[in-house]
Image: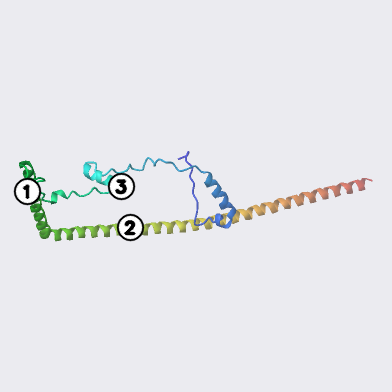
Amino acid sequence: MDSEKLLDSLPYYDDDLQNFPILKEKVDRELAKEGKPPSTLHPRVPPPVELFTKNQLLKAELERVETHQQMPPLDSIRYQLPGPASSPGTDEEWKAALDNARAQLEQQKLRLTNLTLLQTYGVNAWKIHNYRVEETVKSVEKAVEEMRELTVEVNRERKNAQERWGKQLTTLETRWTELISNILQIEMANLALETEVERLGGKEADLADMIQE
């Protein structure tokens, strides 16, 4: 702590920059001479959070969104039932068309199952989710309001303390000015007395010479 410089100010009390524009110009010139802020963060700043480290699909999607790339076109072939390209078609072509039809049938079954589950449990699930979100929002808003009130209270106490200290400083500065003025008056009186003493001393010497004559 001895090697560190402790700089403090009373912004609620010090108004020299407002009262003396030339001081503000000097401060601005000094600030302009300061170097640029460091490009590296403070060591206490935590490193950036890397998302989706265990899910490469989501990580790639996040990188795509961050780089503003277009989403790849949706593969619509899986939703179609194309027949063999040739007529009457080979066994391999008919087998591929049949496999595609079976895959789409299973997809439709799964979709129907999901829709049934959503219709049965989706409403309650969404209600629970919305309730949790609302509670989270209320908690965050309450924390923000408490922090705002705490900030206002800290600034209020800081202002009151600085105004109190400012009055003490003003009183001490006025007293210091009065003492300096008294000292100057005493010094001037001393000079006047010394001059008077020298004059009287000279006059005494002249009278002594006149008596001796």
**Mark 1 or mark 2, which is nearer to you?**
1
In this figure, which residue is indicated by the disc labeled 2? 144
Q: Which amino acid does label 3 sit on?
A: Glu
Q: Where is residue 126 in the image (x, y as percent from the top left)?
A: 17, 59
In terms of sequence position, does the residue under pointer 1 or pointer 2 come before the other? 1
**Mark 3 or mark 2, which is nearer to you?**
3
The residue at 37%/57% (across/down) is: 150
Q: Quadrant of residue 18?
A: bottom right
The residue at 24%/41% (across/down) is: 53
Residue 28's disc number: none
In this figure, which residue is indicated by the disc labeled 3? 66
Q: Position of residue 29 (x, y in %)?
A: 55, 47
Using the numbered discs, state the Cα–Cα distance from disc 1 to disc 2 in whole angstroms.
55 Å
In this figure, which residue is indicated by the disc labeled 1? 102
In terms of sequence position, does the residue under pointer 1 or pointer 3 come before the other? 3
Q: What element carries label 3?
A: helix
Q: What residue type is labelled 1?
A: Arg
Q: What residue type is labelled 2?
A: Val
